Image (cartoon, rainbow, N blue to C red):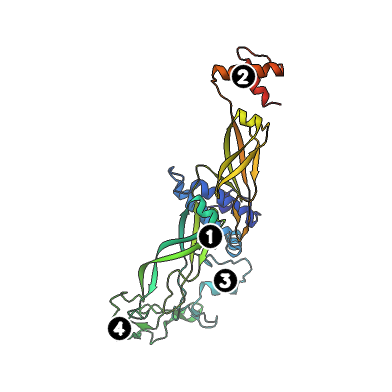
Amino acid sequence: MPDYYEILGVSRDADKEELKRAYRRLARKYHPDVNKEAGAEERFKEINRAYEILSEPETRARYDRFGEAGVASGAGAGYPDFGDMGFADIFESFFSGFAGGMGTRTPTRTRGPVRGDDLRLDLKLDFREAIFGGEKEIRIPHLETCTACNSTGAKPGTRPRTCPTCSGAGQVRRATRTPFGSFTQVSVCPTCNGEGQVIEDKCEVCGGAGRKQETKKLKITIPPGVDNGTRLRVSKEGDAGLRGGPPGDLYVYLFVEEDAEFHRDGINILSELKISYLQAILGCRLDVTTVDGPVELKIPPGTQPNTVLTLENHGVPKLGNPVSRGDHMITVLIDIPTRITPEERELLEKLAKIKGDRTGKGGLEDFLGGLFRG
């Protein structure tokens, strides 16, 4: 029995933000496009399932109360809770569908329009696409309404006819004698499956289903600032409904590829810049690469190794508020040479004498190191 809290590595009282952070971290680690280890794909599916259940308050509440049984086979599925039920209620739950002194429970019928299923699509973005957003063309296989029969399932020019078994009721009744008395069992008609109608001449295009499988091209808008695990809802682009019912929705889950030069920390972008020891000592201005293109960065004189310099407003736009952006934070790495020319050594030794530092074998390295220790 899976423990969805354990799968995400969070406590049972974790809030929505904690769940989201845990999901993004694990999704990035186990996504099949990133992790090629055996079992990574199954682990990724477990993580998605856990987040889908725990991120929605209604399904989380059912899971907390009933466990996996409360969320099995989609929303609303589960086992009955007999905790607050008396004997009569329990008896009725086992004899649902019978009449005869204990009341009548009518089985659910499938007649009438039914909303189509929601669909899910995983979409991979490169680093800059996630930052700046834009339009993406996708292909999604889904069920569309059959236009040949107008979703009736019957061959054009014909109509479904009334079911001969249930006479259009969609239900059949059967009397049963038991030690408790006479009961009438009401069940869904096995001939028409509750439709009340049967199709004799099926549509040749959809085979009587009223829907057919198609692959559709869509253009969707990616908002600036999306990240791993961001979910986009595309209204009415899921499967078509049954019997003229409304279509479901399409949910697009986004996964962002790593970049060789930049790393992302929330809405901030991190990178490294290597400079020479002379540039660090004297200071300079250099053009550095950002997601916006080259930007001039000032290196102050006496810059120490691993100093972090900030370019404001060159980070990631805030999701939902693209006018506000994070920063680009650059860690400075200083390249101290292992070999120098005789002319360079002569100049550096003169400088060492001025500073009063010891030189000789190993002395130059000590001198250079001392420059960056203050």
Q: Nearer the viewer, residue 101 or 16?
A: 16
| Disc number lying in front (1 or 4) | 1
Mark 1 sits on what residue? 231
**Residue 85 picture location, percent across and down:** 62, 70
Mark 3 sits on what residue? 90
Q: CA distance from mark 3 to mark 4?
A: 49 Å
Residue under the image location 52 percent in, 58 percent down? 133
Q: CA distance from mark 1 to mark 2?
A: 60 Å
Residue under the image location 58 percent in, 58 percent down? 54
For this view, does 182 lie left or right of residue 65?
A: left
Instruction: Describe the element under mark 2 as helix, strand or loop.
Output: helix
Decide which of tag 1 and tag 2 comes sooner along the chain.
Answer: 1
Three-letter amino acid code at the position of disc 4: Pro
Instruction: Describe the element under mark 3 as helix, strand or loop.
Output: helix
Using the image, determine if residue 189 lies above or below residue 349.
Answer: below
For this view, does 232 lie left or right of residue 214?
A: right
Three-letter amino acid code at the position of disc 3: Ile
